Amino acid sequence: MIYTNPEFEKVFGTKAEYLFSAPGRTELSGNHTDHQHGCVLAAAVNLEMLAWVKPNDSTVIRVQSEGYPLSVIDLTDIEIKEEEKNTTNSLIRGIAAKFMQMGCEVKGFDAYITSTVLPGSGLSSSAAFEVLIGTILNHLYNEAKSTAVEIAQIGQWAENVYFGKPCGLMDQTASSVGSVISIDFADNSKPVVEKIDLDLTANGYALCIIDSGADHADLTDEYAAITVELKNVCRIFGKEFLREVDEAEFYENIAKVREIAGDRATLRAMHVFNENKRVEMQKAALRANDFDTFLKYVTESGLSSWRYLQNVTPTGRTAHQEVAFALALAEKLLAGTKGVCRVHGGGFAGTIQAFVPLEVLDTFKTGMEKALGEGRCHVLSVRAEGGVLVKEGEL
């Protein structure tokens, strides 16, 4: 790795003293379960954000992300700014505010950030950014006292409260902790995180994330509708999250659920109940080194997401169904092999995931990119480290 970055000195007029890194993440299973206090499998990947950093002895945080305007946050003013919603500034301000609420010290620093976690790649560049900023503050001013899970919680809080997106905690946790992990969010304040060994190459597979080319704009309502509809189901049983609803009671009252919440909400709840159980079965399969069974459940998860959760095609879209097309093409290219694919992450637009046998990887990648465009099929590996301080000293 090249530790120096001349762009830091060009922007800030001095040399950096620290280098930090935070990875992107991929969801392996547990599609839209985290915001219902459910179970997920996720992994940090080998695409990352890097930050060259120097404390600046002020009350101002300055962050220059490559290719974007300079963010300047005055730490004497950490109130929520409505005009900052959905911006980088809101995340920085929110993370700083949360550290202050926790009684931690927060001072200014300068940072120059580069990224191979491309926005809209489905690998959660926003979570990597949140983990990166949290890791910087944790190391510079708080003796690295906050745990990886606490850094993730700080990032999620900033995204929920300051950025204005009602996300779950999976993305930040996977980025912050690293490796392949299972997460049980039954108690969101104390998620149970377990690392799991997974050597894809030893099993003869590559992990691919494929960009479908769909437009990500104006999909906030589609994502929000999932949480709103599931909350409507929960209210019928006097609960806040679906994890708190007894599954047997749900099915005993399913006619009432359909009448009050509607069929789509009912189907989405059925997906979450089944997906939580699937994650546990996949975790058991990986621990038993039974990769074929793990892949069987990957397929089941994908079909459930498409049929029940219904996060493949945005409402009313007919002519443009990029994610559905990408899934159909991947299935065609993987026919006759043990490879599998599924919708990845939030869905509706963006990416799909495929576990591709190594012997057909080149053919698969070529076939996907012939139809979708060059550079759309990313071959990834699992990264063991989460958010980390890479190097200290003049860079």
Image (cartoon, grey):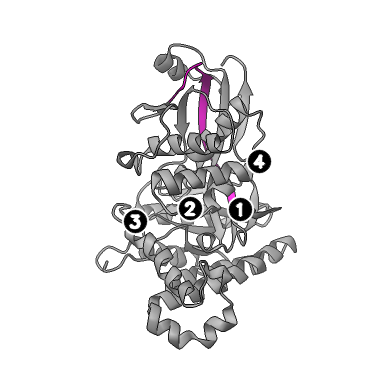
Q: Is residue 361 magenta?
A: no
Quarter placement of the C terminus: top right
CA distance for labels 4 and 1: 13 Å
* Residue identified by numbered label 2: 209
CA distance for labels 4 and 3: 31 Å
Tags 2 and 4 in contact by the CB under 8 Å rule?
A: no
Task: Give the mark nearest the N terminus, 2 or 4.
Answer: 4
* Residue identified by numbered label 3: 220
Q: Residues within 10 Å of mark 3 (few under 14, many from 20)?
A: few
Asked where in the image residue 13 lies, by quadrant, the reply is top left
Residue drawn at the location 54% of the way across and 57% of the way down? 360
Question: Mark number for residue 189?
Answer: 1
Asked where in the image residue 8 lies, by quadrant, the reply is top left
Magenta segment, which residues?
42-61
Task: Give the mark nearest the N terminus, 1 or 3.
Answer: 1
Point out the frontmost of discs 1 and 3.
1
Q: Amino acid at mark 4?
A: Thr
Point out the frontmost of discs 2 and 3.
3
Task: Give the mark nearest the N terminus, 4 or 1.
Answer: 4
